[in-house]
Image (cartoon, rainbow, N blue to C red):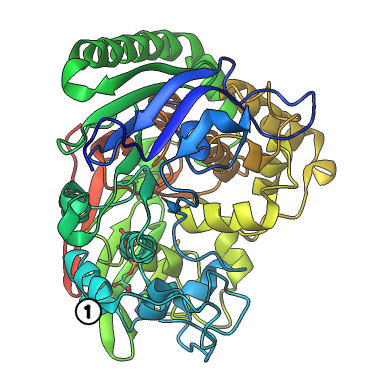
Amino acid sequence: MTSKNHFIVRITNALFKQSLSKTAQPVFSKPISHFEIKPNENWVLWGPGKAKMMNILSNKYLCESPTSMSFMKLNPHVEQVQFKGVIPTAHLSARYEYYKDEFDQTCKQFILDNGANSNKVSYKISTSDRKVNMELYNKLIKSLKLVELQDRYAMGLSNGQMRRARLTHTLLKEPDLLLVDDPFLGLDPTATSIISKFLATYNHETLGGCPIVIGLRYQDPLPAWTTHICCVDETNGILFQGPINELQQKINAIKSREDKILQEKKVLKTAENSFEIDDLVASHPMYGRDRHEIIKMPETIELKGLDVSYKGEFVLRNLRWKVEPGSKWHIRGDNGSGKSTLLSLLTAEHPQSWNSKVVENGKERRTGNANYFDINKRIGMSSPELHAIFLKNSGDRLSIRECIATGFHEGSSNNFIPMWDKLSDNQKKIVNMYITYFELQDISETKLFDEVSVSKQKLILFVRSLVKMPEVLILDEAFSGMEAEPMIRCQEFLEYWPGTVLVVSHIAEETPKCDHFLRLISPGQYTIGNIEN
Ligand SMILES: Nc1ncnc2c1ncn2[C@@H]1O[C@H](COP(=O)(O)OP(=O)(O)OP(=O)(O)O)[C@@H](O)[C@H]1O
């Protein structure tokens, strides 16, 4: 297997295009002169061009000439793990519903692929005659800590749990080459280490493994088990490639260049744009309020001993929490500890939301005195679930400007009906100011949401969550998958944001400055404290 002539995939002098059209622009401006993956190697695709390079390897583009890309096998089995958050549904609330009908699949059914990846068909009917290697299944669910979750409804899995299930689902197909973009996105440190340790040993014959290719951003640490690196620019393609231990100098040079650019931009932008930021936030109801005023206001949110349970099993228990107007909170906790559940309660997506233990601006929430739309009037949000639904429902029909304009739908973050033509002149001005500030003007009318990178999609959803000047801004993994520069720009902006902010994120760099934290540990166990900045 290790002979020099063995390769899994080989590219020689190939130019890649998105379509057959004569005018189609190449994916990378220059042809790839040589790229090759051998059986015992594990690669990192590193930098802003990683997603395009991954699409090349998974055969998503047309190759000129067709023989310039070859695989060891005639019908190679290349699998790409798609991490898209939880299973996208029509509504955010579907995830939290009590009653699951016979068409809903369990985690085990999802992994075994009986539903052939679709949530439009009955999952009870097997749509493929693929034989599943149950020995491998049992090994995988043990290694990826899914044994206890097998019978849970796939829809109810937390983001981190779902990512482990998706990885298992893909590995069971026993691919010849495994591609995973952003493998650690949205994972808590324990889950990151579970997946990293697992991938470290996967390409060994005992598990029937194969080479792994992961996509990482410049700011991500390179796992020790990766052997080769391919640094990819978004327009020019491969900048350099080869064994990591021979390229350390080049890697360090890129890392320090990136750090320097960020530092320079940080200093420049804060100085240059503070006036502009004022313009962007001046219409927020909390803008300009001083401390004396704020302490007289009722709590934006108060939880007076909140419980949430499924079939008698608690996820949240006796949670007491006070959120002062304009305060910024980091909600912490491992995958599955209940963070999204808590947020879904606040946005009334959860069936147990009508609960007098939730008090908003001094008013108890009860059926009759609160409705979904009133609750959501004051909330703006970005989350992995919203991202998945947005892509599915509107990704291929809304321009960037139109996406942002849908943030003005008053009573729901989950309404994607085009809105631009209905906006007042002032609202249009706000959208345009935000587009300019976040440097989206070049693509705002020419590109559709699903035509831009994940990093830009996240930026657009962030901006979308702000424009209606919500009293409460919910940022659930809002910056995961973003390139460093736009992320820092968003975080700096948030320092001037006058409203209440609730942030969920697992990685320090992706967490904007917050004053307080709420850490969920287990049902009934949590800590609350201040963050020294
Ligand atoms: N409908 C449901 N039925 C049963 N259990 C559920 C349901 N919905 C969620 N859960 C469980 O509740 C727990 C909390 O999930 P939640 O998504 O709130 O976690 P989280 O802290 O946001 O995790 P992550 O960091 O992975 O996003 C998980 O163990 C999840 O499997």
- Relative to the observer, which residue lies in front, 394 or 72? 72
Which residue is rendered at x = 26% and y = 29% of the image?
228
Quadrant holding the C terminus: top left
Quadrant holding the N terminus: top left
Q: Residues within 10 Å of mark 1 (few under 14, many from 20)?
A: few
Against 306, residue 175 (above or below) is above
**On the picture, is 519 further left or further right than 27?**
left
Which residue is rendered at x = 63% and y = 66% of the image?
373
- Residue 493 figure quarter: top left
Which residue was labeled with disc 1?
A: 148
Total marks shown come to 1
x%, y% of residue 423? 79, 42
x%, y% of residue 271? 42, 9
x%, y% of residue 491? 39, 31
Against 38, residue 437 (above or below) is above
Q: Is residue 488 visible?
A: no
**On the picture, is 85 further left or further right than 519?**
right
Which residue is rendered at x = 58% and y = 85% of the image?
122
x%, y% of residue 291? 35, 38
Q: Can you tell me which quadrant of the image ligand 1 is in?
A: bottom left
Against 256, residue 77 (above or below) is below
Which amino acid type is marked by label 1? Answer: Glu
Which residue is rendered at x = 54% and y = 83% of the image?
367
- Element type at marker 1? helix
**On the picture, is 186 further left or further right than 118?**
left
Farthest right residue in view: 421
Q: Is residue 96 visible?
A: yes
Against 47, residue 175 (above or below) is below
Note whether ligand 1 is within 8 Å of mark 1: no
- Relative to the observer, which residue lies in front, 45 or 38? 38
